Image: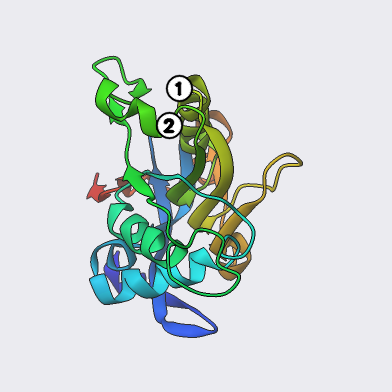
Amino acid sequence: MEDRAYSVSLTKNPLISMKVIPGHFTTNHFHISHYLDVSELKTNAVIAKDVARELSIPYLANVSVDTIVCMEGTEVIGAYLAEELMQEGVGVINTGKEIRVLKPVISANGKLLFQCNVQQYIRDKEIVLLVASISSGTTIGRALDCITYYGGVIAGISALFNAYPAGDEQVIHSMFTREDIPGYQVYSMGECTMCREGQKLEAIINSEGYTNI
């Protein structure tokens, strides 16, 4: 499987790249035609800082941010993003502020929640939601519901990769989109073209990586 891998780089900063493996993969919710490995973007401090700089651009001048909520292991990027947003400079709206970087916890029944000691950083606060990948919209929908439930105000959504169609209510700022990956497809489990063509599933994928079947 790894021998099919190739890299897709950000045009204006080739240091920012993700590994792409075409195939037939499954998650808990859907089947997908490509596995996107963004682990280097999330874990390499040098690269994560560059990623945060790119993601900060839509917010620097005119979006007030109190808290960054991180999903799918994006906490390192989130910390650097907070640093970028709080930098000193003319026209940087969050200069001098304190920005919190949080992640929700998952309850025993699979619900997202914020524990009591950090709910004060969500309620009535301007929130940027940071996720690694948006394919079906399931994860981002759960995260938005959680933030709204605890009284947070969505100031923005940022993603390393976004394949989800843009909605009318909320713009998603992303570095890579499905246009960067020719042939990228997401299928509900009962409507997967690859299954109908007899192509066997190769691996189970989640935000941490993949497990061969």
Q: Of callouts 2 and 1, which one flags the residue occurring earlier in the amino acid sequence?
A: 2
Q: Is residue 38 left or right of residue 144?
A: left
Pointer 2 with pointer 1, Cβ within 8 A:
yes
Please tell me whether mark 1 sits on a helix, a strand or a loop: loop
Query: x%, y% of residue 110?
Result: 32, 21
The colour scheme used to paint the residues is rainbow
Q: Which residue is mark 2?
A: 122
Q: Residue at x 71, y 42 (%)?
A: 167
Q: CA distance from mark 2 to mark 1?
A: 6 Å
Closer to the camera in the image, 122 or 136: 122
Q: Residue at x 24, y 44 (%)?
A: 213
* Residue 99 can be seen, yes or no: yes
- Characterize the local packing of mark 1: few (<14), some (14-19) or many (20 or more) Cα atoms within 10 angstroms: some
Query: x%, y% of residue 143?
Result: 46, 33
Amino acid type for the residue under numbered disc 1: Tyr
Q: Which residue is mark 1?
A: 150
Q: Is residue 97 left or right of residue 176?
A: left
